[in-house]
Image: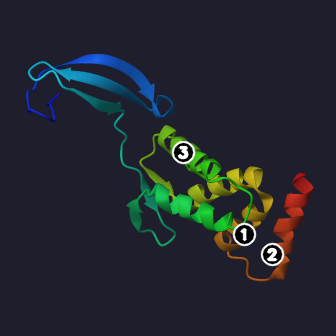
Amino acid sequence: MKCPYCAHLESKVVDSRPAEEGASIRRRRECLACHKRFTTYETMESLPLMVVKKDGSRQSFDRNKVLGGLIRACEKRPVPYSALEETVNEIEQVLQNEMEREVSSAEIGELVMERLKKLDEVAYVRFASVYRQFKDINTFMRELNKLLEDK
């Protein structure tokens, strides 16, 4: 590891510990030349995930888009931001674990709705109304009735 102070290429690891809930490893290193310490993080390399949109176009997965949709759905609701971030992490982990490099936007939408239903029912209905593109009050009522039946 190259020292950020003197650019020497050799260092020793002084301390290692898990970081980001086990998603990476934090290492304290000491340069063998100047003896200054610095921190590095080791993370697993993930393969890029492509989202196939309804029109057939493809774009790279953007967790910020999923988080943005959750934030809009949960606006003025008693849902902590940390719960939304955790939800996005769960969704991203599910998609990475599938080992498919391409995923449909519909699958992502279903994963979001599944988790929103448990998190906040009003936010779920808000998200579903946009995601499922409710055309009239009857389709909206059908979704509400399904939600009531599940209880």
Q: Position of residue 35 (x, y in %)?
A: 15, 21
Q: CA distance from mark 2 to mark 1?
A: 13 Å
For the residue pair 24 and 2, the one nearer the viewer reads as: 2
User: Dots 3 and 2: beta carbons under 8 Å?
Assistant: no
Q: Residue at x 61, y 48 (%)?
A: 82
Q: Residue at x 63, y 55 (%)?
A: 112
The label number, if any, that marks residue 126 in the structure image: 1
Mark 1 falls on what kind of element? helix
The three-letter amino acid code for the residue at tag 2 is Thr
The answer to whether 96 appears left or right of 47 in the picture is: right
For the residue pair 70 and 149, the one nearer the viewer reads as: 70
Q: Is residue 120 above or below residue 54?
A: above
For the residue pair 40 and 108, the one nearer the viewer reads as: 40
Name the residue that disc number 2 marks. Answer: 139
Q: CA distance from mark 3 to mark 1?
A: 21 Å
Q: Earlier in the sequence, mark 3 or mark 1?
A: 3
Q: Residue at x 12, y 18 (%)?
A: 32
Q: Residue at x 45, y 59 (%)?
A: 51
Q: Earlier in the sequence, mark 3 or mark 2?
A: 3
Q: Counting other residues with Cα less than 10 Å from the Cα at mark 2, is it few (<14), some (14-19), or many (20 or more)?
A: some
User: Dots 2 and 1: beta carbons under 8 Å?
Assistant: no
Name the residue that disc number 3 marks. Answer: 89
Q: Nearer the viewer, mark 2 or mark 1?
A: 1
Q: Is residue 116 above or below residue 100?
A: below
